[in-house]
């Protein structure tokens, strides 16, 4: 990956990874409760309000609120919205929607970041396939996170899974390193060439997050300067986990 090599990627100690695991487990618990709330008729602001309560109850800091002036604790993106949708009291989800919830926590000096795509009520076959492929692509990328592999191996595997299914991967937005900062080096595109980029080493921690479009990969940003949408207005799915490379291989920190 141009501009990135091993010297830019922070290696975490075992104790630091354990701290991140705590952050990740808390985030997983919060996201699981929000997913249960994602029923037809609920507003995205209802989800935001409950998220803020959950952050407070668990004594953790929402990572997104105020980050680069972002106005909410959650990103809630619906259907053709790819990422960074802002919760609103006027935005209600309905049966058939694809709702993406993206959130992060900061706890004891470390961040965790994760996202889920939720089918609201009954969704059509293409939407369900989009969810399944995006999730499959994420775990395929996780499985490539092995000591001795290269960063491009992750990117290429995600791309292969998505494109084999007839979908496209968003190229303007990427996964990233994570730790004491929400976004660290390296950038991790969801497309690329196997065998390229820095070698993966134990102690690296990445937020892997394929964004998968039903149509073309190109996106644009709406007037609110945050919400990213597909240019053809076809649907998109998004999954993300924070993953540590441990002695036995990759370990998902944001999954119970």
Image: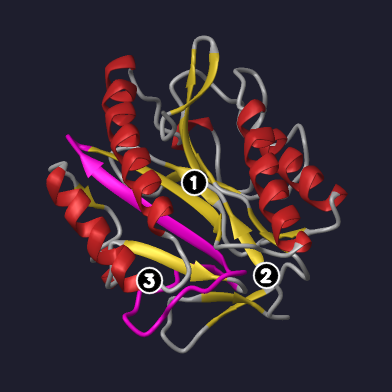
| Residue placed most toward the observer, 98 or 74 | 98
Residue 17 percent coordinates (x, y):
34, 23
Residue range (magenta): 81-109
Residue 207 percent coordinates (x, y):
48, 42
What element does badge 1 sit on? Answer: strand
The alpha-carbon separation of the residues under discs 2 and 3 comes to 18 Å
Residue 202 percent coordinates (x, y):
49, 18
Quadrant assignment, res 136: top right
- Identified at 86% across, 57% down, the residue is 166
Q: Which residue is mark 3?
A: 44
Check residue 89 for magenta coloring: yes
What element does badge 2 sit on? Answer: loop
Name the mark on residue 176: 1
Check residue 172 for magenta coloring: no
Dot 2 crowding, Cα within 10 Å, few <14, some 14–19, many 20+: many
Q: Tell me the quarter of the image containing the N terminus.
A: top right
Q: Which residue is mark 2?
A: 235
| First reached walking from the N terminus: tag 2 or tag 1 | 1
- Identified at 45% across, 34% down, the residue is 9
Discs 3/1, front: 3
Residue extending furthest toward the top:
248
User: Could you tell whether 89 is left or right of 200 in the image?
Assistant: left
């Amino acid at each position: 990956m141009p501009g990135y090599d091993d010297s830019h990627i922070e290696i975490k100690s075992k104790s630091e990874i354990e701290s991140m695991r705590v952050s990740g487990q808390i985030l997983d618990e919060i996201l699981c409760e929000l997913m249960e709330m994602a029923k037809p008729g609920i507003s995205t602001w209802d989800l935001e309000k409950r998220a803020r309560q959950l952050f407070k109850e668990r004594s953790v800091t929402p990572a997104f609120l105020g980050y680069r002036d972002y106005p909410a604790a959650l990103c809630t993106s619906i259907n053709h919205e790819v990422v960074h949708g802002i919760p609103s009291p006027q935005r209600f989800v309905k049966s058939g929607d694809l709702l993406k919830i993206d959130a992060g926590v900061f706890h004891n000096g470390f961040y965790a970041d994760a996202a889920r795509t939720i089918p609201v009520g009954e969704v059509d076959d293409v939407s369900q396939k989009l969810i399944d492929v995006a999730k499959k692509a994420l775990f395929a990328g996780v499985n490539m996170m092995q000591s001795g592999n290269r960063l491009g191996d992750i990117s290429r595997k995600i791309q292969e899974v998505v494109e084999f299914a007839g979908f496209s991967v968003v190229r303007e937005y990427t996964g990233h390193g994570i730790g004491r900062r929400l976004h660290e080096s390296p950038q991790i595109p969801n497309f690329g060439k196997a065998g390229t980029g820095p070698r993966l080493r134990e102690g690296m921690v990445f937020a892997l997050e394929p964004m998968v479009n039903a149509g073309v990969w190109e996106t644009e940003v709406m007037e609110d300067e945050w919400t990213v949408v597909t240019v053809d207005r076809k649907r998109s799915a998004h999954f993300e986990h924070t993953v540590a490379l441990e002695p036995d291989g990759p370990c998902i920190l944001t999954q119970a």
